[in-house]
Image (cartoon, rainbow, N blue to C red):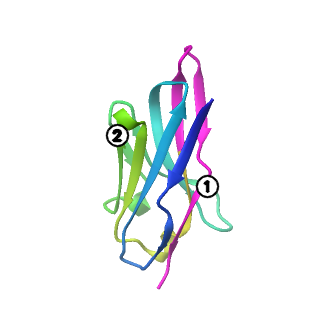
Amino acid sequence: QVQLVESGGGLVQPGGSLRLSCVASGSILSINLMGWYRQAPGKERELVARMFSGGSTNYAESVKGRFTISRDNAKNTFYLQMNSLKPEDTAVYFCNVFVTRIGGDFWDAWGQGTLVTVSS
């Protein structure tokens, strides 16, 4: 199995910053794709940012220039740095990985979610 543990959510004022962390553990040979998604009340889950194993990234248009996804391969940890936060960024944020497991099969795992609230 593969487990993800998220941290870093909370309440922040508009214009503020937060950094989310996601630690992956388990029988992981390699992380092929890592991403952050979010789901606001009454809305569908949407992709925020993702990073492929080679380092290329994709961002939702709404967060480009404000959010940055990064990783620490040695720690199997990846991050979402969120700057210039807006009230519309309020959502539960989920991390996701697609990995190759020891043994050669693939696994798709999700974190438990962490709430980010942007409000004055």
Query: In this rendering, does residue 74 appear at all?
Result: yes
- The residue sitting at 40% across, 61% down in the picture is 63
Residue 8 included in the magenta stretch of the image: no
Is residue 57 positioned above or below 100 on the image?
below
Depth check, front residue: 48 or 100: 100
Disc 1: which residue = 45
- Location of residue 89 in the rendering, given as x and y in whole percent from the top left corner: 49, 68
Disc 2: which residue = 72
Badge 2 element: strand
Q: How many marks?
A: 2
Amino acid beneath label 2:
Asp
Is residue 107 positioned above or below 46 on the image?
above
- The residue sitting at 59% across, 28% down in the picture is 107
Amino acid beneath label 1:
Arg
CA gap between label 1 and label 2 equals: 25 Å
Question: Quarter-wise, where is residue 19 in the image?
Answer: bottom left
Depth check, front residue: 68 or 6: 6
Q: Residue furthest bottom?
A: 120
Quarter of the image with the N terminus in it: top right
| Residue range of the region highlighted in magenta in the rendering | 96-120
Query: In this rendering, does residue 73 appear at all?
Result: no
- The residue sitting at 39% across, 46% down in the picture is 58
